[in-house]
Image (cartoon, rainbow, N blue to C red):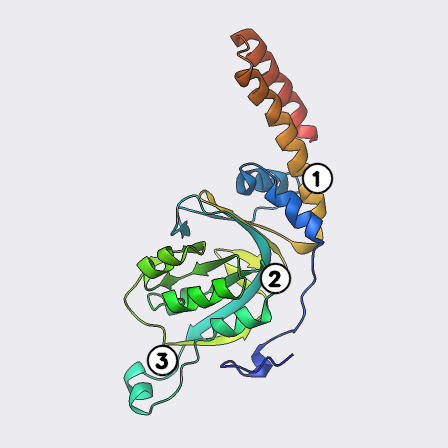
Amino acid sequence: MNIEGLVPLNRIKTTKIPRLDSGVIDAYLSLPDRAGVVSRALDKLGIVTTLPSVKLHSLIPKSSIVGQAITVRNIPENQSPYKRWIQKETTYLGERDAYFLAEQGDVIVIDGISVYPASCLGSMSARLAKYLGISGIIVNGCVTGVNGIIDNNLPVWALGGTTITGHQRVETIEIKGPIGIMGMRIEPGDLVVGEDSGITVVPFYQAEEVLKKAQKLVLLGSKIKQCLESGANKSLIRKEIKNQMEKMPNT
C-alpha cells in the first residue's frame, strides 16, 4: 500500500493497528445510550475514559459513533504563517493522510489543543473523510467551515468553530501514535463510543470485557423499562428499582 502523503513516513508510527472482531463492534452498536452505559461499565474496572460533551460537543445533534481510533497529533508550526505563505511552502496539516490509513468505520481522533484556536479540520477535509468511509472525527481543538461540516452529515465532536485556518499554522507531527486528551491516554485501535452526552474510549484489550459488563447493565435497566411500558403500579416499580440497585455492585 502506498502511504506517501503530506506527512513524512517517519511520522506514521505504524501501518497496522490491532483489530476488533466486527461482531464486537456490532454488539456495541446495539447498546442503548451506549456512551453512558459503556462509561458505567468501565467504572466497574476502575477506568474513567470519558470526554464530556460540555468540553467536546457534537456539531450534529443525535450523532452516534462506534469505531476504532486512528490518532493524529498536531503541534504549532515554528515559522509565522505569513513567512510560510510568501515562501509558498506547502501545508503540513496532515489529517487527510490518516483517512487513507484508516479502514471502513474507523474514527479519527485529533489532538490539536496546542494549536488552539487554529483549525484542525475543515469542511472539505470532513467531506473526504466521509467519502473514504470514516465514521466520525473527534477534535480536541477547533474546526472551521462548521456549516459545511454539518451539511456533510459526518459526526464531528470539537471544542467549537474558528475562522483561523490551520494551513501554515499547524503541523501534523505524528499519526497512529498514543495521544493524550484531557488527561486521558488514547492508543490507536482503542474503541471510541460517542453520542451527544460525550465520548467514551474503551482500551482495545478490554473491549470484550467491558462489552459484557455493559450488556448486563442494559439488561438490568430493561426490567424497569418493561415495568413502565406495562403500566405497573408504584409499588412494583419501586421494588424493581431496589432490586436493580442491589444487583448493580456485582454486575
Question: What element does badge 1 sit on?
Answer: helix
**Residue 187: image tag:** 2
Q: Nearer the viewer, residue 78 or 64?
A: 64
Location of mark 1 (residue): 212
The disc, 1 or 3, on the residue closer to the chain's N-terminal end is 3
Quarter of the image for the N terminus: give it.
Answer: bottom right
Q: Quadrant of residue 85?
A: bottom left
> Spatial distance from mark 1 to mark 3, Cα to Cα?
46 Å
The disc, 3 or 2, on the residue closer to the chain's N-terminal end is 3
Location of mark 3 (residue): 168
Q: Position of residue 62 (x, y in %)?
A: 43, 43
Mark 1: which amino acid?
Answer: Lys
* Residue placed furthest toward the front: 131
Residue at 61% across / 40% down in the picture?
30
Q: Position of residue 187 (x, y in %)?
A: 61, 61
> Spatial distance from mark 3 to mark 2, Cα to Cα?
27 Å
- Tell whether 59 sits left or right of 239: left
Q: Position of residue 190 (x, y in %)?
A: 62, 57
The disc, 1 or 2, on the residue closer to the chain's N-terminal end is 2
Whether residues under marks 3 and 2 lie with C-beta atoms below 8 angstroms apart, the answer is no
Residue at 61% across / 81% down in the picture?
2
Residue at 43% across / 54% down in the picture?
157
- For disc 3, the neighbor class at 10 Å (few under 14, some 14 to 19, many from 20) is many
Q: Is residue 131 above or below residue 92?
A: above
Mark 3: which amino acid?
Answer: Gln
| Circle 1 or circle 2, nearest the eye | 1
Quarter of the image for the C terminus: give it.
Answer: top right
